[in-house]
Amino acid sequence: MYYIAIFLVRIAYFIWYNVKFEGKDNIPKDRGCVYVSNHRTYADPPLIVLGVKRKFSFMAKEELFKFKPFAVLIKSLGAFPVARGKGDEKAIESAVDAINNGRNLVIFPEGTRSKDGKLGKGKSGAALVAVKAHTDIVPVGIIFEGNKLKFRSKITVRYGKPISYQEYVDEKGEPVLRKLVKFKNKYMEDIAILIGQGDNENKKNKEDSDV
């Protein structure tokens, strides 16, 4: 069902949009990783997935699971619920399990969509998942003109170089709050560079210690 859905989505997206992928050589092929990206529209998750062959799982806000038929569909595609802003430990465990089972994971560290295209403050949940799963983070930048996608909008999806989790753990390989914040700052800086907002966003994220 996953591959059937991806096949249909691919057809729909390439008919409706003008999509280009860059940096595909940066995509790890031998393991599941955490993909972090800026978040502008509801179309973002498939845009990230379509450039990668390995299966994905998704953290999705728990409100999307209230309508049971839709919940069944998105669960079959690898989605699982997360309670935003509540430190959802069950969602973290589900994310780590997905990666350990060989899947990639998409997380939007801003936590919500940007209405003006500017990169917002990131959270360090993706860093925590990566450290717990002992895997790397792949930054992704999604770029298009205007604030909304339209028919045949030109979209560029850029995959950055993987960021190793190993620099951001203690001697035992365990997460450390201070290092998680640095890990978060690093992937937010990389996303900013990928979408052409590097100078301003780097400065903001270096000053940001919000977990």
Image (cartoon, rainbow, N blue to C red):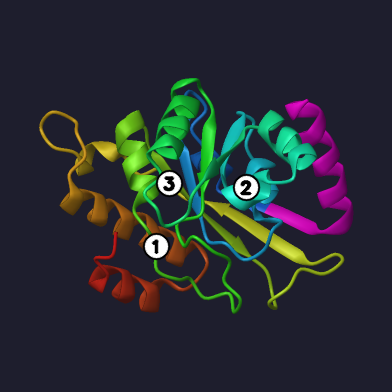
Of circles 3 and 1, which is in front? Answer: 1
Q: Residue at x 68, y 46 (%)?
A: 66
Observer-nearest of 72 and 24: 72
Please give the residue where the numbered disc 2 appears in the rendered image. 48
Q: Is residue 132 left or right of residue 21?
A: left
Amino acid type assigned to the residue bearing label 3 in the image: Lys
Q: Residue at x 71, y 62 (%)?
A: 155
Instruction: Indicate which disc, 2 or 1, sits on the residue closer to the N terminus.
Output: 2
Say if 93 sits above or below 150 in the image. Answer: above
Disc 3 to disc 1, how far (Cα)?
A: 19 Å
Q: Is the stretch drawn in magenta largely helix, strand or loop?
A: helix
Amino acid type assigned to the residue bearing label 1 in the image: Gly
Observer-nearest of 131 and 81: 81
Q: Is residue 124 left or right of residue 32?
A: left
Badge 1 marks a residue whose secondary structure is: loop
Q: Position of residue 137 (x, y in %)?
A: 40, 43
Q: Position of residue 181 (x, y in %)?
A: 25, 56
Please give the residue where the numbered disc 1 appears in the rendered image. 122
The residue range painted magenta reads: 1-20
Please give the residue where the numbered disc 3 appears in the rendered image. 161
Observer-nearest of 177 and 66: 66
